[in-house]
Image (cartoon, rainbow, N blue to C red):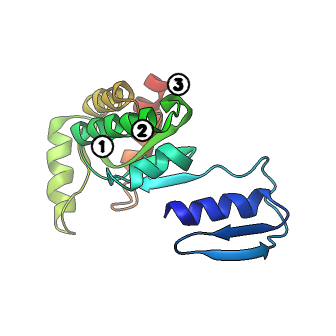
Amino acid sequence: MEEAIQLILKMWTEPRTTFHGRYFHVEEAILEPKPVQKPRPPVMIAGGGEQMTLRAVARLADACNIVGGDIAEVRHKLAVLRGHCDEAGRDYDTIEKTHVEHWLLARDAAAVAAKRERLAARGPLRGFVGTVSEAIDLIGQYQDAGVDLLINSNNQRNDEETRELFVSDVMPHFA
């Protein structure tokens, strides 16, 4: 993965690229047109592998998406990333840290229970299932852990109420 990213970065920024790595070998390769973003598009690496993925983030990426895990796991992965940044001489704060979470919200515990019962017939509910106040608390914990951007993935249940509650009741707490 690191070698592929190194090659891509060179192709984005050099008129002609020569690269000899373990997996990739190119001579005077041309990539045209170049990306519009200057000096290059940002690179995001997603995952949570502590030895390869997070080390590659520290060395090469502008952003990372910590995939999976609860708040404790995300905290741990970000601590590992910080260690890799220290080893690489990289400023940890220059990396945007993101996390995707599946959300299912309701106004109160009774509404959560009803929604759980109604939607569970379609399969297991993944991610956060709870009230608006519980969601606000959890988002605050993600912020405290160091997550810069929390991505709402509501595609599993396509729950309109969840989207509405996020906009009306959750997001104003973090604007």
- Label placed on residue 36: none
Q: Within the image, what quadrant is residue 73 found in? A: top left
Q: Earlier in the sequence, mark 3 or mark 1?
A: 1
Q: Which of marks 1 and 2 is nearer the N terminus?
A: 1
Single out the mark in the foreground, 3 or 2.
Answer: 3
Is 34 placed left or right of 75 in the picture?
A: right
Classify 47 as above or below 166. below
The tally of labels here is 3
**Mark 1 nearby-residue class (10 Å; few <14, some 14–19, many ≥20):** many
- Label placed on residue 166: 2
SS class, disc 1: strand
Label 1 to label 2, Cα distance in Å?
Answer: 8 Å
Q: What residue type is labelled 3?
A: Ala
Q: Within the image, what quadrant is residue 26 found in? A: bottom right
SS class, disc 3: loop
For image coordinates 42% across by 36% down, the residue present is 87
SS class, disc 2: helix
Identify the residue under disc 1. Answer: 105
Can residue 152 be seen from the camera position used here?
no
Label 3 to label 1, Cα distance in Å?
Answer: 19 Å
Classify 90 as above or below 121. above
Q: Which amino acid does label 2 sit on?
A: Phe
Residue 57 locus on image (x, y percent): 48, 48
The reply to whether dot 1 and dot 2 touch (C-beta < 8 Å) is yes
Q: Earlier in the sequence, mark 3 or mark 2?
A: 2
Identify the residue under disc 3. Answer: 175
The reply to whether dot 3 and dot 1 touch (C-beta < 8 Å) is no
Residue 54 locus on image (x, y percent): 40, 48
Is 100 placed left or right of 41 in the picture?
A: left
